[in-house]
Image (cartoon, rainbow, N blue to C red):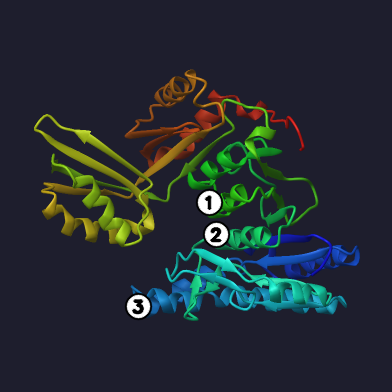
């Protein structure tokens, strides 16, 4: 067993999007290797490679089977790890490329959305002890029945964090095409501020509410095993954002604003008001592996209820088909589907302790004539469902209302 801690790094698709980018990453890896740093590197497919593979599958069939789709999509990462390993070899450094299966990532059998169950680290340690940089394909694993699986979009983040936990690494570095986590998307808000630090819970809300910097499952694992995540750009060496325990940070009312246009709203109208209806609706979608992001029940004057469900846009058609069948059982009079909605959220550790947050949020939206369709809240988040074409305006309005361009977030301790 090696004595030195293993540094785990993850490089996203844009970071290895060309031969020139791959060579640049290889130079960085070689530089740290020459300093005696043990490295395990998780790599995504080259930029747009996964989309191209998926497009080809959809040209063959509109509904490819999940097993074969996973087998297809995992090839994107295999291209990346092979090319990066070759680039490291050219610099005179030993390295070895491993698929998720080869490095011991065992998952359940849920194709396209598998969850990691165990990681066997013996082979990884063996290759590290032999002086290799270990380069692992993200986003994938294998079942006990030797079936290839994928972890869902953004799954390379999850791979890296799970490996960092398995190897007891002191930090997991996530290299991407942005400088870190901002108070809002810099594409929408020109004066969005880079956050030097953010808490796990806040980051989880960012990830689940539309920020595509980190995958939610990655943050969950990092929080569970107390692994600091460093999010930084692969195109320069400036500091980015560090995700740490909330108790190490000063509390602020609002840390940032996020938006998500990749959602859909499905409403079951005038559902009979009897026990078990909510359970029947939610179970039917759970059995189909559809995640319900939000469910709101509204009471009507005629002793019936309206159920509004927020799901991902990609699940909309499948969910509608399922609920058409269930609607007869729960006596729903109508099913409405709207794929032109979006969610805007304000997130911060001080949401629950600052009663003025909700009022300021709602007033800012009202001042910009943005209608709120649904509202949900937690201790660190308030989210509103609005029309998709008003999302950018809502983000800018809320960023200004909470003066986030002047936000300063400091650590209380580095312990």
Q: Which mark is residue 61?
A: 3
**1 and 2 marks in contact (CB < 8 Å):** yes
Which residue is painted at 16% across and 59% down in the image? 325
The residue to which callout 1 is attached is 216
Tell me: 242 left or right of 395.
right
> Label 2 to label 3, Cα distance in Å?
24 Å
Q: In which quarter of the image is residue 390?
A: top left
Secondary structure found at label 3: loop
Q: Where in the figure is residue 93, as x and y percent of width and height?
A: 85, 75
Q: Which of marks 1 and 2 is in front?
A: 1
Local crowd size for mark 3, using a 10 Å CA cut-off: few (<14), some (14–19), many (≥20): few
Residue 142, position as x, y percentages in the image: 52, 75
Q: What element carries label 1?
A: helix
Calculate the distance from the C-alpha at mark 1 to the C-alpha at mark 2: 9 Å
Whether residue 322 appears in this view of the structure is yes
Residue sitting farthest toward the top:
356
Q: Distance between the residues labelled 3 and 1?
A: 30 Å
Q: Are marks 3 and 1 in contact (CB under 8 Å)?
A: no
Q: Which is more foreground, mark 2 or mark 3?
A: 2
Q: Which of 200 and 51 is in front in this view?
A: 200
Q: Of the numbered discs in the image, which one, if any, rests on residue 154?
A: 2
- Residue 161, located in which quarter of the rendered image? bottom right
Which badge, 3 or 1, comes first in the chain's sequence? Answer: 3
118 left or right, relative to 86: left
On-image quarter of the N terminus: bottom right
How many other residues sit within 10 Å of disc 1, few (<14), some (14-19) or many (≥20)?
A: many
Q: How crowded is mark 2: few (under 14 residues within 10 Å), some or many (20 or more)?
A: some
The mark that comes first in sequence, 1 or 2, is: 2
């Amino acid at each position: 067993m090696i004595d030195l801690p293993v540094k785990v790094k993850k490089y996203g698709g844009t970071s290895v999007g060309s031969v020139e980018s791959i060579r640049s990453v290889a130079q960085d890896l070689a530089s740290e290797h020459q300093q005696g740093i043990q490295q395990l590197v998780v790599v995504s497919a080259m930029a747009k490679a996964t989309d191209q593979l998926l497009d080809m599958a959809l040209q063959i069939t509109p509904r490819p089977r999940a097993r074969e789709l996973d087998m297809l999509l995992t090839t994107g990462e295999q291209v990346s790890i092979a090319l990066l390993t070759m680039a490291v070899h050219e610099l005179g450094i030993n390295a070895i490329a491993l698929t998720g299966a080869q490095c011991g990532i065992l998952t359940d059998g849920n194709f396209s959305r598998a969850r990691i169950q165990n990681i066997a680290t013996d082979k990884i340690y063996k290759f590290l002890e032999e002086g290799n940089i270990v380069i692992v394909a993200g986003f994938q694993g294998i079942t006990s029945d030797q079936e290839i699986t994928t972890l869902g979009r953004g799954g390379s983040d999850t791979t890296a964090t799970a490996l960092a936990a398995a190897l007891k690494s002191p930090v997991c570095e996530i290299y991407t095409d942005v400088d870190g986590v901002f108070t809002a998307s810099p594409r929408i808000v020109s004066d969005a501020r880079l956050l030097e630090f953010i808490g796990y819970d806040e980051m989880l809300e960012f990830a689940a509410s539309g920020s595509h910097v980190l995958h939610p499952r990655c943050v969950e694992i990092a929080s569970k095993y107390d692994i600091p995540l460093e999010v930084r750009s692969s195109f320069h060496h400036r500091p980015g954002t560090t995700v740490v325990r909330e108790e190490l940070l000063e509390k602020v009312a609002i840390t940032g604003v996020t938006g998500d246009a990749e959602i859909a709203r499905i409403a079951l109208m005038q559902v009979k008001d009897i026990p078990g209806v909510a359970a029947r609706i939610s179970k039917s979608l759970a059995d189909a592996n559809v995640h319900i992001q939000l469910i709101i029940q509204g009471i009507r004057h005629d002793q019936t209820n309206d159920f509004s469900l927020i799901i991902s846009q990609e699940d909309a058609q499948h969910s509608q088909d399922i609920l058409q069948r269930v609607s007869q059982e729960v006596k729903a009079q109508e099913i409405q589907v709207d794929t032109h909605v979006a969610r805007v959220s304000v997130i911060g550790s001080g949401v629950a302790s600052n009663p003025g947050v909700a009022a300021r949020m709602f007033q800012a939206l009202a001042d910009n004539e943005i209608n709120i369709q649904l509202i949900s809240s937690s201790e660190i988040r308030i989210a509103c469902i609005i029309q998709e074409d008003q999302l950018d305006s809502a983000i800018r309005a809320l960023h200004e209302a909470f003066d986030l361009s002047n936000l300063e977030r400091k650590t209380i301790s580095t312990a």
